[in-house]
């Protein structure tokens, strides 16, 4: 998998997470819930899986620009070889982190999620370093 494909995959994964939330909200509206029932207030009753999906989506969304800048800068600089070997691992660890996020919030799961996140941060730093070297 090349870096651009990994970036597209990361974007698609982020979109899939938000589509899950939109689908759930659409079903709730069809079941009679008012369309303005959701806000930023966490007191609104939302199933745990949906709340975790919201958080997983926001976390993916926060990191997508970082990954995009690295991959697009590599392409613009003609240095895609510097990120090719690791870009796919950013995608894999993002998906793993999100899936763990969706499963639950036990201490062991949070530790697993954090581990995958720190691996992603390490990959970002490594790719940036490779671009600057």
Image (spheres, rainbow, N blue to C red):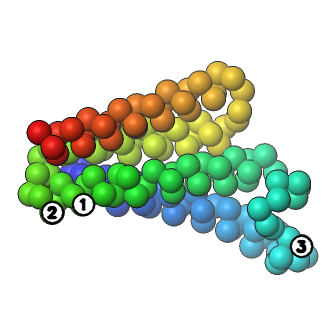
Q: How crowded is the residue under tag 2: few (<14 C-alpha within 10 Å), some, or many (20+)? A: few
Q: Is residue 51 left or right of residue 37?
A: left
Marks 2 and 3 sit apart, C-alpha to C-alpha, by 47 Å
- In the picture as drawn, the residue positioned furthest to the top comes out as 108
Q: Residue 5, percent across and down?
A: 28, 57
- Residue drawn 59% across and 36% down? 100
Residue at image mark 1:
72
Residue 75 vs residue 49, the one in the foreground: 75
In the picture, residue 111 is in which quadrant?
A: top right
Q: Secondary structure at mark 1?
A: helix
* Quadrant of the image containing the C terminus: top left
In the picture provided, is 120 more to the left or to the right than 34?
A: left
Residue at 74% over, 51% down = 51
Q: Residue at x 30, y 44 (%)?
A: 88
Q: Are marks 2 and 1 in contact (CB under 8 Å)?
A: yes
Circle 3 Cα neighbour tier, 10 Å, few/some/many (<14 / 14–19 / ≥20): few
- First reached walking from the N terminus: tag 3 or tag 1: 3
Residue with the mark numbered 2 = 76
Check disc 3 and report its element: helix, strand or loop. loop
* 133 to the left or right of 108: left
Question: Counting residues from the N terminus, which is met first, the one under dot 2 or under dot 3?
Answer: 3
- Residue 57: percent from the left, percent from the top? 58, 54
The reply to whether residue 22 is in sight is yes
| Other-residue count near label 1 (Cα within 10 Å), few / some / many at <14 / 14–19 / ≥20 | some
What's the CA distance linking mark 2 and mark 1?
6 Å
Between 112 and 76, the one nearer to me in the picture: 76
Whole-Å distance between the Cαs marked 3 and 1? 42 Å
Q: Closer to the camera: disc 3 or disc 1?
A: 1
In contact (CB < 8 Å): disc 3 and disc 1 = no
On residue 34, the disc is none
């Amino acid at each position: 998998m090349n870096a651009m494909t990994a970036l597209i995959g990361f974007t698609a994964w982020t979109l899939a997470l938000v589509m899950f939330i939109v689908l759930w909200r659409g079903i709730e509206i069809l079941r009679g819930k008012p369309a303005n029932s959701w806000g930023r207030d966490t007191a609104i009753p939302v199933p745990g899986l949906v709340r975790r999906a919201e958080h997983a989506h926001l976390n993916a969304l926060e990191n997508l620009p970082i990954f995009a800048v690295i991959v697009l800068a590599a392409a613009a600089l003609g240095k895609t070889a510097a990120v090719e070997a690791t870009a796919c691992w950013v995608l894999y660890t993002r998906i793993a982190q999100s899936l763990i996020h969706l499963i639950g919030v036990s201490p062991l799961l949070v530790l697993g999620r954090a581990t995958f996140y720190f691996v992603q941060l390490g990959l970002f730093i490594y790719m940036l370093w490779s671009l600057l070297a």
